[in-house]
Amino acid sequence: MASTRRPDAPNRRLDPSDPAWKSVELVQRGRLILDVAEADLEAAVAALGPFHPTAWYFRTARDEARRSWDRLRAEYGRAALEAALAEPPAAVLRLGGDQPGQPALTLITIGGRTYRVEPIAGTEPAPVQWRLTRLPALADGPYYVCRLRDGSTQCDCAEWIYQIDGHEPGGHCKHLAALAELGWL
């Protein structure tokens, strides 16, 4: 999959042909796959019960994703995996959207966690807005990220509200930083 990063985006320090970039992308893609497999299993168990054949299928898929993740950890080491997950998003996974009227599901890693990223309709005060939902879903989400008409950015996560807003003019939480790196804000 080709990178969706714009050539003028700030994270152009890593070239897609660079082995370091390939390692970061591989680790982030592995995390995306593991988190999607866990969310699929959780949904199947909730809808059909733990012993339904579909739940068993998703349990097997999740177990295979875990084994793959463990192989990555054995090959690269825990510190390298954590460093790769701390990098700005290098892997963007798009699912669906092939059929007319079917929206695509876009997933990225932010701070080592998988997020579903959805553009939402902007308003006059905030023309660019995004909804970020953790996978598997958390009770305190989703988060909303926006670029205001004056060019400033905001997020409704606790880090931005309690540590950045009013304290660090122009500061970014991890959500804002990730979308800015992708050139989406």
Image (cartoon, rainbow, N blue to C red):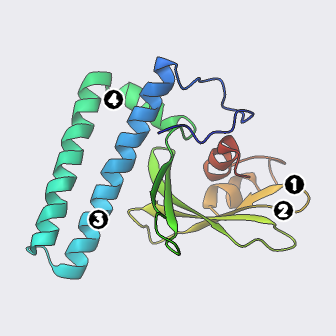
Instruction: Using residue 69 as the reference point, say whether residue 90 is left or right of it.
Output: right
In this view, the residue in front, 96 or 69, is 96
* Amino acid type, label 2: Leu
- Between the residue at mark 1 and the residue at mark 2, the CA separation in whole angstroms equals 5 Å
In this view, the residue in front, 106 or 85, is 106
Q: Nearer the observer, disc 3 or disc 2?
A: 3
Mark 4 or mark 2, earlier in chain: 4
Answer few, some or many: residues within 10 Å of disc 1's Cα (few below 14, many 20 plus, some between 14 and 19): few
For the residues bearing labels 1 and 2, Cβ distance under 8 angstroms: yes
In the structure shown, which secondary structural element does the residue marked by tag 3 occupy?
helix
Q: Where is residue 149 shown, x and y percent of the image?
A: 89, 62
Give me the residue at 26% from left, 68% from top: 42
* Amino acid type, label 3: Asp
- Between the residue at mark 3 and the residue at mark 2, the CA separation in whole angstroms equals 35 Å
Q: Nearer the observer, disc 4 or disc 3?
A: 3
For the residues bearing labels 3 and 1, Cβ distance under 8 angstroms: no
Above or below, 105 against 33 in this view is below
- Between the residue at mark 4 and the residue at mark 2, the CA separation in whole angstroms equals 39 Å
Give me the residue at 55% from left, 69% from top: 142
Instruction: Using residue 111 as the reference point, say whether residue 172 is left or right of it.
Output: right
Mark 4 or mark 3, earlier in chain: 3
Label placed on residue 148 = 2
Circle 4 residue: 78
Label placed on residue 40 = 3
Above or below, 130 against 48 in this view is above
In the structure shown, which secondary structural element does the residue marked by tag 2 occupy?
loop
Answer few, some or many: residues within 10 Å of disc 2's Cα (few below 14, many 20 plus, some between 14 and 19): some
* Amino acid type, label 1: Gly
- Between the residue at mark 4 and the residue at mark 3, the CA separation in whole angstroms equals 25 Å
Circle 1 residue: 151
